[in-house]
Image (cartoon, rainbow, N blue to C red):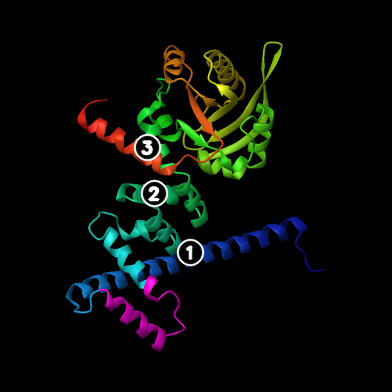
Amino acid sequence: MEKTLSAKNTADSFAEVIKIIETSRESAFRKVNEELINMYWQIGEYISEAMKNSAYGDGYIQNLADFFAENYPELKGFNRRGLYRMKQFYELYADTEIVSSVMTQLSWTSHLKLMSGCKTFEERRFYMEMSIKEHYTSRELEQQIDSAYYERYMLSSKMAETAITETGKKIRNIFRDNYVLEFLDVEETVEEKDLQKSIVRNLKNFILEIGRDFTFVGEEYRVQVGNHDFFIDLLFYHRELSCLVAFELKIGEFQAEYISKMGLYLEALDREIKKENENPSVGVILCASKDDEVVEFALSRNLSPAMVSEYTLKLIDKQLLQRKLKEYIELSESGAIE
């Protein structure tokens, strides 16, 4: 009698085949994308150099586009606009230290969004590295640019106060002073429970806002201290920090007593939930508003790694943030602030 594979072994075997196929497809896609980006770069370089020596000036691109339309109509993206974008792509990075191995990890659509949505090289480089790290789709990248993620991150990195811990520097780079939660589509007068439920329903967008390294553990997460039960609004695990992260949601202004309660939660997590190989838990108190001086005093003698961030339910005006960041940088360079 012929031996037959068990159902489990068969499923495992098939799953391995599918894994091989998906890995090969992903590798092929990356290679095709790499060649495509390199091709656009070379064409952009050729057009840029040719226009310097061409008597046609700007008409050179139109003539080239007409040539493609007449002789190679099957090629898409080689119209006047597309060719101009290739030239712009080359000229934006020609004098920078960005290597092709970085640029070719992004799709052409993502590069187009960077070119149209960013004003400075620093901003484009920031989003480029963030897209690679977080594996953004072009649509997710556009969402982050539109929400002024760069400006908010830079202002937060320069101005946020965090607890003094061994992981303080990492925490400062990961957590921000302000989060935009406009995707929740809730009223400004929302109750804390409703805010929490809306975040859970829109978990993908929430994690996109706070960072892809977060993994959701649970809502209303129960911790026990003595004979009392306490419930953490939202609990996440952060891969880079290798620690649990507790989020407490407050619809009003920050109050100093929130710190002691968060400290209780973090101590309970560290004693009962944290594994031996993990770092101490981190707490984030997400408030609708806060007085920075009150926050500074509240955190100054607190040993738990906690920080206080604001949230807004509407997109912040990007131009306003750009002006604030520019003013802050100018003040820093003049020595007015440290």
The answer to whether residue 145 is left or right of residue 215 is left
Q: Residue at x 20, y 30 (%)?
A: 334
Q: Secondary structure at mark 3?
A: helix
Q: Residues within 10 Å of mark 2 (few under 14, many from 20)?
A: some
Q: Which residue is mark 3?
A: 154
Q: Which residues are magenta?
A: 58-82
- Is the magenta region chiefly helix, strand or loop? helix
**Residue 295 in the image: x percent, y percent?**
45, 18
Say which quadrant the N terminus sits in: bottom right
Whole-percent x, y for residue 337 in the image = 27, 25
Return the residue at label 2: 129
Determine whether, in the image, residue 176 is placed left or right of residue 219: left
* Residue 189 position (above or below residue 202): above
Q: Nearer the viewer, residue 122 or 81?
A: 81
Q: Position of residue 93 (x, y in %)?
A: 28, 58
- Is residue 333 located in the magenta-colored stretch of the structure? no
- Give the mark toward the camera: 1 or 2: 2
